[in-house]
Amino acid sequence: MADIIDGKKISARVKEKIKAEVSALKDKNIEAGLAVVIVGDNPASRVYVNAKKKACAEVGINSYEYALPEDTTQQELLDLVNILNSDDKVDGILVQMPLPKHINENDIINSIIPNKDVDAFHPVNVGKIMIGDYSFLPCTPAGVMELIKSTGISIKGKDCVVIGRSNIVGKPMSMLLLHESGTVTICHSKTKDLKEKCKSADILVAAVGVANLITADMVKEGAVVIDVGMNRLADGKLCGDVDFENVSKVAGYITPVPGGVGPMTIAMLLENTLTSAKIKNIIK
Ligand code: NAP
């Protein structure tokens, strides 16, 4: 039976450390601030934004919410980002995705100055991740790395399989595993023999968005299985991409959904905001 990697517990430890650092900054009269921008009334986005604001409050980071109506124009949003780019109390800018269809998400991402881009989606930060010289890591892959490290298993030389190649999860995830000297295979919807590829993995990261795609017969005995997926079932329950009940009988370590990657993603956002505040104030 697999050991369960408790993302809630691990993220609580990370948040305690951040809280102590934020408090030390306050002793030097430095406050860290995160601007959270939400456009429209997507209920899932509202839940995420509230969770991020709550997490900021827990560790003492100031959060500033900018809730804009659904019919906000792209130019109005760009204007707000511009203001936040030069607002000294703001160390991080997070524009909650998805945006309404009439707004080009890439244009908005590209308008955030890279040193406040705490999601690490800006091409400058993406490029820095590629060459392994970065200030911020994208929150979800960074959280996954912490969860893998918590098992005590070294990534070096391991066969790692990442399912999913999105810009926000799959691609940066693969790069981080590669930086740690994993041998990385990236799978996607056109991959042949997904089962065989997954079965070769010592470390398997599923970031797909298909409930129960990863079944027990696709997993190597003793593997570390990280489930990034967040899928809402017809009965309203949240589940991952991994058939948790059966895969946990084969894997060595496994993350649950909820309570695995999700809480770590938020903890990493706080860490990036703190890092930005420290860089601005030239504190190591
Ligand atoms: P995405 O942009 O939709 O990417 C999904 C990826 O999965 C794509 O690369 C797609 O391949 C691949 N895929 C789809 N069906 C597949 C299949 N049957 N076999 C193999 N690969 C398949 O999604 P995302 O933004 O990366 O998010 C992935 C999941 O993680 C979602 O459930 C999302 O809600 C969740 N998520 C969770 C957190 C968290 O904090 N826990 C954060 C971010 C995302 P193609 O490229 O070929 O289309």
Image (cartoon, rainbow, N blue to C red):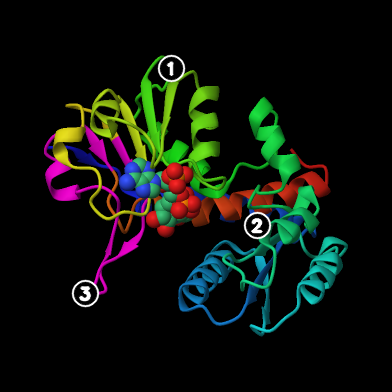
Can you say whether 264 is above or below 101 in the image? above
Q: Nearer the viewer, mark 1 or mark 2?
A: 1
Q: Is residue 228 visible?
A: no
Q: Quadrant of the C terminus?
A: top right
In this view, the mark in front (1 or 3):
3
Taking depth in this image into account, of 193 and 98 the one nearest to the observer is 193
Q: Quadrant of the N terminus?
A: top left
Residue topped by disc 2: 23
- Residue type marked 2: Ser
- Sequence-first tag of 1 and 2: 2
* 182 magenta-colored: no
Q: Tell me if mark 3 has few (under 14), some (14-19) or many (20+) residues whose alpha carbon lies within 10 angstroms of its own.
A: few
Q: Nearer the viewer, residue 73 or 138?
A: 73
Secondary element type, mark 2? helix
Disc on res. 156: 1
Q: Position of residue 17 (x, y in %)?
A: 54, 48
Question: Could you tell me which residue is drawn at 72 percent across and 43 percent down?
Answer: 123
Mark 1 lies on a secondary structure that is: loop
Highlighted magenta segment, given as a residue range: 225-254
Residue 19, quarter of picture: bottom right
Q: Which mark is residue 235?
A: 3
Mark 3 or mark 1, which is nearer the start of the sequence? 1
